[in-house]
């Protein structure tokens, strides 16, 4: 075996090891080992540089998606990797955008199940009752997931949130900023809307109909400003109602936290992800959901079917790029799904593996 080319060993720590071994009987062996370590480091550095160059060539959305996909594929699941939502909200979601002030009720149906979300009022310190909007958009969905996750993890209906908003927002890649036009205010608006609203979940079979009143929060401490120029403070605690918390513990559906962060700006993508998650684990044979049903559930705001189809195809492509094994196809008939294991969506098997039971008769 020929002499070792010491110039191949460049890193300072490796050079230090080389000098320490110089003059010993094992010098040649140590030198060869250090050359191999240097070569491995060089290869890893080249791969890292190539990866960085590739990411730099992408748009911000593409880059975020690529990073999330890599995390899903390479990092093991931990408790922090999982969030939870109520499985009912995977079937019937909230409005995608703000409703007119005169509209205080919103209904969405899915087959023979429906959810009606009614806006409510919150009591102000002066005794007046302030009308809140119907909760809407991606922030309302993310907040429900955030609050439900804390409740499930701690097995408590009361969630301490006074100090958690900023951390939660930063997890989503949103820098917390106060003031009327800051990033915090829209989240406050949605938590107050959620605190005041009421969910009415219904099911029917052609012969009977049943309705369950599922007001999500029993208590919320909201601090209102004394003057119009003052900002509303973030609530200190929220307590889920007994009925909702009991149902949440039975029907908490795990979702991947990294995916929520990636989809944080799109209410429809979040709904699609929740719905796919639920459907994949509640079927035991191939299922085709027709376009008419998809339009009822996800087509809010579209006047033309072709526009809805094009938008849905684009949003599904984003989700499928995160999960290459996802057994989902978009066809002229609608969406075709096949049963799959939890590994396809990088989550453990959900508790809500079967369709939710019909609500008790009111």
Image (tube, rainbow, N blue to C red):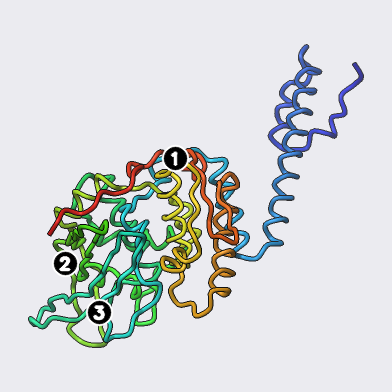
Q: Residues within 10 Å of mark 3 (few under 14, many from 20)?
A: some
Q: Classify the position of the C terminus by image quarter.
A: bottom left
Place of residue 194 in the rendered image (x, y in percent of width and height, measured from the top left): 25, 68
Which marked residue is nearer to the observer: mark 1 or mark 2? Answer: 1
Q: Earlier in the sequence, mark 3 or mark 2?
A: 3
Contact between labelled residues 3 and 1, with CB atoms less than 8 Å apart: no
Q: Quadrant of residue 218?
A: bottom left
Is 114 on the left-hand or right-hand side of 297? Answer: left
How many marks can you see? 3
Report x, y in % for residue 271. Answer: 42, 61
Mark 2 sits on what residue? Answer: 221
Can the viewer see residue 237? no
Q: Which corner quadrant holds the N terminus?
A: top right
Residue marked by disc 1: 284
- Viewer-proximal residue among 264 and 162: 264
Q: What separation in Å lies between label 3 and label 2 (alpha carbons)?
A: 22 Å
Asked whether 171 or 362 is in front, the reply is: 362
The residue that mark 3 highlights is: 104
Q: Earlier in the sequence, mark 1 or mark 2?
A: 2
Q: Is residue 310 visible?
A: yes
Which residue corresponds to the image point at 34% horizontal and 82% vertical from the top-left? 180
| Cα separation between marks 1 and 3 | 39 Å
Dot 1 alpha-carbon crowd within 10 angstroms: few under 14, some 14 to 19, many 20 or more: few
Front residue of 140 and 87: 87
Outermost right residue: 2
């Amino acid at each position: 075996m020929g002499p070792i080319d010491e110039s191949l060993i460049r890193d300072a720590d490796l050079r230090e090891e080389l000098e320490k071994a110089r003059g010993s009987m094992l010098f040649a062996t140590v030198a060869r080992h250090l050359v191999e370590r240097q070569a491995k480091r060089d290869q890893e550095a080249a791969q890292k540089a190539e990866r960085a160059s590739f990411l730099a060539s992408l748009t911000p959305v593409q880059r975020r998606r690529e990073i999330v996909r890599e995390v899903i594929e390479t990092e093991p699941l931990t408790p922090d990797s999982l969030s939870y939502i109520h499985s009912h909200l995977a079937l019937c979601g909230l409005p995608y955008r703000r409703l007119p002030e005169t509209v205080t009720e919103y209904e969405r149906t899915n087959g023979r199940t429906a959810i009606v979300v009614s806006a409510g009022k919150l009591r102000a310190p002066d005794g007046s009752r302030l009308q809140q909007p119907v909760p809407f958009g991606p922030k309302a969905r993310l907040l429900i997931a955030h609050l439900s996750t804390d409740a499930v993890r701690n097995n408590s209906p009361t969630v301490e949130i006074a100090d958690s908003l900023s951390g939660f927002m930063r997890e989503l890649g949103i820098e917390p900023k106060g003031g009327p036009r800051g990033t915090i205010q829209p989240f406050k608006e949605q938590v107050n809307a959620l605190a005041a609203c009421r969910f009415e979940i219904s099911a029917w079979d052609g012969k009977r109909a049943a309705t369950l009143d599922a007001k999500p929060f029993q208590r919320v401490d909201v601090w209102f400003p004394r003057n119009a120029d003052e900002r509303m403070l973030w609530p200190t605690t929220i307590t889920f109602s007994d009925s909702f918390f009991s149902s949440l513990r039975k029907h908490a559906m795990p979702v991947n936290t990294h995916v929520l962060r990636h989809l944080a700006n799109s209410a429809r993508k979040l709904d699609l992800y929740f719905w796919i998650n639920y459907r994949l684990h509640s079927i035991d044979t191939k299922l085709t959901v027709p376009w008419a049903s998809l339009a009822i559930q996800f087509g809010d705001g579209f006047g033309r079917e072709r526009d809805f189809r094009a938008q849905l195809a684009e949003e599904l492509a984003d989700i499928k790029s995160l999960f290459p094994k996802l057994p989902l196809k978009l066809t002229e008939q609608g969406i075709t799904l096949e049963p799959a294991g939890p590994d396809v969506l990088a989550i453990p098997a959900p508790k809500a593996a079967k369709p939710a039971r019909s609500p008790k008769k009111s």
